[in-house]
Amino acid sequence: MGLNSRKILGINITIDTKDKVLEEIEKGFKTKHLEPRTKDKKIQKPLIIFTPNPEIINFARKDANFKEIVNSAQINIPDGVGISWALKKLYRLAVKRLSGADFMLDLCQLSCEKGFIIGLIGGRGGIAVKTRECLMKKYLGLKVEVFEEPEIQLRTKNLELRTNSQLFINEIDNHRVGRKRLRHLRGGEATTSTPRMVEESGERYFESLTKEIQKKRIDILFVALGFPKQELFINQLKDQQLTTNDQRPFILMAVGGAFDYIAGRTPRAPEWVRKIGLEWLYRLIREPWRLGRQIRGAEFFWRVIYK
């Protein structure tokens, strides 16, 4: 891709404007549906988008495997005023913060205009379903698929899926996701892939998910599992995708708590607070349990100053 980046404590950060990043992404979709799928076509790697913030960069410094995964992304948007500050401190570059939640909405707008199909996976308590409803109201005509993720655990900084994972089946009638009963979906607007429990390994799960993604012709999959699970999840899914003979463009983006914001579960800071770079303080006041994370994130600043 024709994008520029700089390193902050060993992590690549994309420094181009939001419009430039969206332009490069759109270029990858120009041949969509124009070329037939054939087995002899060159396999295309999925486009990976991560959203590094000071906490993620601190974690990556201490975990070589995670650092490699984050740096494997073609796009690492500067998610946090701390990242913008570091770019100015280290390189004298004025780069605006670009939050993952805002960029997700930008991609949804693009998808609505171009007819791309998006997928949602992650969140808690069926929040992905509510997110779908909110997105479809905001962007009329947007095509959305919802996938339920398996129960994921981290063991020694590695991703583990429980043996009772989930194989996807498609249902439009009433069904249960978590403890909620979902209403009947209107045909032609969106479908929901719901799980039936089967005995399968983590590898089998990713194979099943890849087939479902291809079957539904997903163009952009938003993964909201929280860091570092979502980055590890995307890394494993990326490897599955590489074994396919599908030439169509495909984007995987880690979006953290974006579903909570979009669905209204967690209120965002007012726009003026975001503009002056104090959204972190707003979140801390509303969620005091974040104090420990903020303290850990402070390490990022003194390391940048020391560097």
Image (cartoon, rainbow, N blue to C red):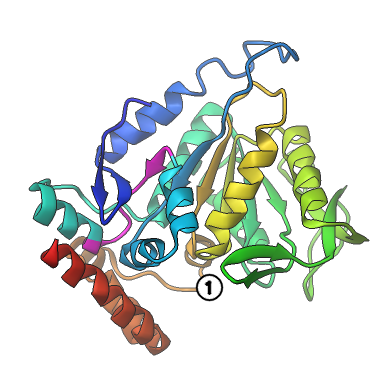
The 10 Å Cα crowd at callout 1, few under 14, some 14 to 19, many 20 or more, is few
Residue 134 visible in rendering: no
Q: Report the number of numbered marks.
A: 1
Amino acid at circle 1: Arg
Using the image, determine if residue 188 lies above or below residue 195: above
At a point 65% along the width and 32% down the height, the residue shown is: 242
Residue 153 visible in rendering: yes
Residue under pointer 1: 265
**Residues shaded magenta:** 74-82
Q: Where is residue 66 in the image (x, y as percent from the top left)?
A: 48, 57
Q: Which residue lies furthest to the right in this view?
A: 198
Quarter assignment of residue 126: bottom right
| Viewer-side residue, 9 vs 134 | 9
Quarter assignment of residue 84: bottom left
Q: Position of residue 275 (x, y in %)?
A: 20, 61
At a point 63% along the width and 66% down the height, the residue shown is: 127
Q: Is mark 1 on a helix, strand or loop?
A: loop
Q: Is residue 76 a member of the stretch shown in magenta? A: yes
